[in-house]
Image (spheres, helix red, strand yellow):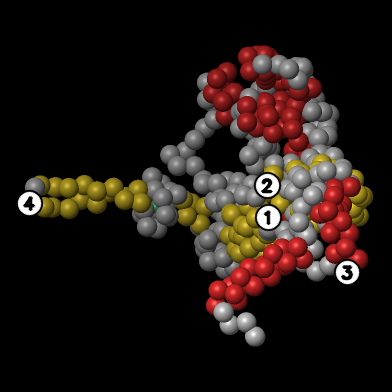
Amino acid sequence: MAARDYYERLGIPRTADEKEIRKAYRNLARQYHPDVCKEEGAEERFKEINEAYATLSDPAKRAQYDRMGHETFTHASKGSYAGGGFEGGFSSDFAGFGDIFDAFFGGARGYQARGPQRGGDLLMRLQIPLEDAVAGAERDVEVWHTEPCTTCDGTGSDTKKVVTCSQCGGTGQIRQATQSIFGQMVRMSTCPRCGGRGRVPEKPCRTCAGAGTHRVKRKVSIRIPPGIEHGMRLRVEGYGEAGEYGAANGDLYIEIRVLPHKGFTRQGDNLESAVEISPAQAALGSTVEVKTIDGRAVDLKVPAGIQHNTALRIPGEGVKRRGRPGDLLVRVRLVVPRHLSDEERELYGRILDLEGKARPNEEKKSSGILSDIADFLGGKKE
Ligand SMILES: [Zn+2]
Ligand SMILES: [Zn+2]
């Protein structure tokens, strides 16, 4: 069931407009809401519906989803935590989840004055060669982050119990009254003992000194989807910092930096390279060998009469985006030889004759005449 694409999950055609999407989502969400539907697998189904809606209801995400296909979109990362996603195009958290509770069930989620805070997100930059951006790649990255302390299960307490903070009485804030010439001033500030949480470990944990978390290095396997662009971020769910006791971890974002390539540049899904040809090849046409970005040699036909800087297209050798790969554009650079053999000189000379243009030695003859005149005028011929 999980493999079904987002359109199938909502039971709508790929051409559905925003209204149809919303309608289908609302109907299904009502039907499968875990508080309403006691059918087996309803909760799973409900999550799937929300996941689909989160993407399809956002025009930008939907466009990217359509372009990349379901697989690429949903399997951008393979952490050992659940899910993971492709930021900017896809997120596997249930962005619509909060909305649906509020809209249909009156916001039944219980909050404390200040609930436990979700862990912070981490951002990491990863440099990849252009080849990997074109074809996709898998990488292992190492990340330092905090995880719940294993000794105290994240509670920060040896007894694994948290108790109400005695300093603020559980409110997380303290009042400070001061006398000034204007009268009494009351200032509210965050409780220094519990840091605003209102609760403190019953007996501070020996391992983490009451923090509830510890710092560890983890290896994360990430999948870089083909076609990723410089500056895009991959999200690895749950690999950010640990949340406060009872709250979720943050996410790890990996920002992709694509390194410049010496032979290829990228324009959207197309790649561009260059090949040098001689004047004879340009005039008569020829076949030249060019390299694709993955190092294969491909024969490229150069048509007769081609002009300098013309781009020739090799279909399908660009960015390997699913379903619609880009092309390789090979720009022809006409390079005039700097040195000629006697035979080549003679052949180029004959072309000049045919074109009715002067050969260089004729020019030399005329410059000879000029120097004769100069000599005559100077009257110093010897
Ligand atoms: Zn306190
Ligand atoms: Zn601990």
Q: Quadrant of residue 128?
A: bottom right
Left or right, residue 159 beside residue 354 = left
Q: Is the distance from the Cβ of mark 2 to the nearest ligand 2 atom less than 8 Å?
A: no
Q: Are marks 2 and 1 in contact (CB under 8 Å)?
A: yes
Q: Residues within 10 Å of mark 2 (few under 14, many from 20)?
A: some
Seen at 55% across and 20% down, the residue is 103
Between residue 132 and residue 42, name the one nearer to us. 132
Q: Position of residue 87 (x, y in %)?
A: 65, 42
Identify whether 362 is placed above or below 225: below
Q: Position of residue 346 (x, y in %)?
A: 88, 63
Q: Is residue 325 above or below residue 147?
A: above
**Quick one: label 4, few (<14), some, or many (20+) residues within 10 Å?**
few
User: How far apart are labels 2 and 4 at the CA level?
Assistant: 62 Å
Classify mark 4: helix, strand or loop. Answer: loop
Residue with the most extreme left position:
181
Indicate the secondary structure of the residue bearing disc 2.
Answer: loop
Question: Is the CB–ligand 2 distance for label 3 below 8 Å?
Answer: no
**Residue at image location 47% in from the left, 38% down from the top:** 112
Q: Position of residue 296 (x, y in %)?
A: 90, 55
Q: Earlier in the sequence, mark 2 or mark 3?
A: 2
Residue type for callout 2: Glu
Question: Mark 1 sits on what residue?
Answer: 258
Residue 342's mark? Answer: 3
Query: Which quarter of the image is occupied by the C terminus?
Result: bottom right
Please tell me which of labels 2 and 4 falls first in the chain.
4
**Label 3 neighbourhood size at 10 Å, few (<14), some (14-19), many (20+)?**
few
Which residue matches tag 2? 229
User: Which of 121/100 is in front?
Assistant: 121
